[in-house]
Amino acid sequence: MSAPAVSTQTPSPYSEFVNPRWEEFLDLVGMNVRYERCLGAELFTRDGRRILDFLSGYCVHNTGHNHPAIVEALKDELDRCGPAMLQTDVPELAGELARRLCGLAGGGLSKAYFCSSGSEGVEATIKFCRAATGRTGLLYAEGGFHGLTCGALSLMSDPFWRNGFGPLLPGAESVPFGDLAALEEKLKTRRIAGFITEPIQSEAGMRIPPADYFPAAERLCKRYGTLLVLDEVQTGMFRTGPFLAAQHLATRPDMVILAKALSGGLIPSGAVLMTDEIYEAVYSSLQRAIVHTSTFSENGLAMRAGLATLDVLEQEGLGHRATAAGADLRRQLTEVLVPFEMLKEVRGIGLLCGIEFTAPRGLGLRVSFEAFRKIHPAMFGQCLVMRLFRDRGILTQICGNNFLVLKVAPPLNVSVEQVAEFVAGVRETAAFIHSSGGFWTEALQLVRRGIRI
Ligand SMILES: Cc1ncc(COP(=O)(O)O)c(C=O)c1O
């Protein structure tokens, strides 16, 4: 298959006025295609290619691209010329969406604060934890991803994201994910307002905690007066099967952050679900009725997108589909990848999966692998992503904080045929990596072209 047409003879307006480095990077990895139409799990490019989306915009497109029911709801919302961003009314749709979200979450989560992104949700929980406990300390799990605003970034340990932006929030400390003893050590100080963590660490490489970790972490948090906040920005909205991953883990968090898929893939939206106690502590009087709010947070289009998204997820049984299709996908991937020495593990829950690769044992491959690693730790993974895209028409990415894990997260309505196509594409690419010098030499040529990734 030939390389896709790239479009960088003269700088595009995007390169000229937004982010030339990003366009340069996409050119480099052969992914700078122009998408024309996106439907379900399929993306169609202007030059006639069809790409299978197994990334879902990092779990934004749980309902698939441009789901007709969500598009219709948004058109209807615009057509009715209703109140939008008045800031002085009671947005009824926000009430309706909050009722549905709290009902699905259960576990004592009975109020919602709406926002427009995952990071904004994380920021809100930092403030709410502090207001509700009167403490300032924050605890997070190493390797997690929570967003790139200053507060959220303070909860991320990876220097790649932090360097050059300090100082960040004082009082933020980390513990290894899954380590109860380390957690208790920190909580014992009774300085910690909130323990904010993903239930399954997605960008860290699909790290699934031991089964007893969260129930025990919840008990420890209660014992020492710390609030447990689950960042379900990627794991929520039925991505792992149930509405929240917390429901898998038999855990009742004090707050949950949702975003990404709540948007229906179309209108930015996020939500923090919290207990009544936390709400009362923050919005504690009439004077404080809007003490934490945001201009766009309860806007009609976002609320309609959220409601229509829930309708689709529930009516099409996409949680069950995620469970069944995820198990099937992992079984098939394991079966076809086991013969390859660079496979470490296929893992995941529902349709949040990862394929972990490891250094090859055989000398031939090992020399090339180490050469790659010396150039850049992400080099192998990025070349794998590039090959899948270019040769097989499959869109994936490596995890942001673990470059040896390929993220596999298609829309929840992915078909059986699309799963089979993905598995075959990954198998063929793995075979190419293991049997031919082509994979390794091509990547080294990129470097010789003087391009640094
Ligand atoms: C788990 C998690 N939390 C928070 C965020 C931040 O969300 P946003 O990019 O909408 O600010 C992300 C983004 O990828 C995420 O994966």
Image (cartoon, rainbow, N blue to C red):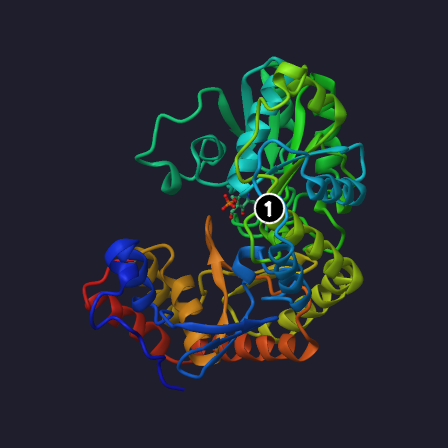
443 sits left or right of 303 in the view: left
Query: In the rendering, at what x and y percent does residue 158 appear?
Result: 42, 40
The amino acid type of the residue labelled 1 equals Ala
Q: Is residue 168 visible?
A: yes
- Judge whether 57 appears above or below 278 on screen: below
In what quadrant of the picture does the C terminus appear?
Answer: bottom left
- Judge whether 317 appears above or below 139 on screen: below
> Label 1: which residue?
259
- Image quadrant where residue 413 sits: bottom right
> 300 and 415: which one is in front?
300
> 298 and 421: which one is in front?
298
**Could you tell me which residue is drawn at 58 percent across and 46 percent down?**
269
Q: Is mark 1 within 8 Å of ligand 1?
A: yes
Query: In the rendering, at what x and y percent does residue 173 appear?
Result: 50, 25
Query: In the rendering, at what x and y percent does residue 416 appear?
Result: 70, 77
Q: Secondary structure at mark 1?
A: loop
Q: Give the number of marks.
A: 1
In what quadrant of the picture does the N terminus appear?
Answer: bottom left
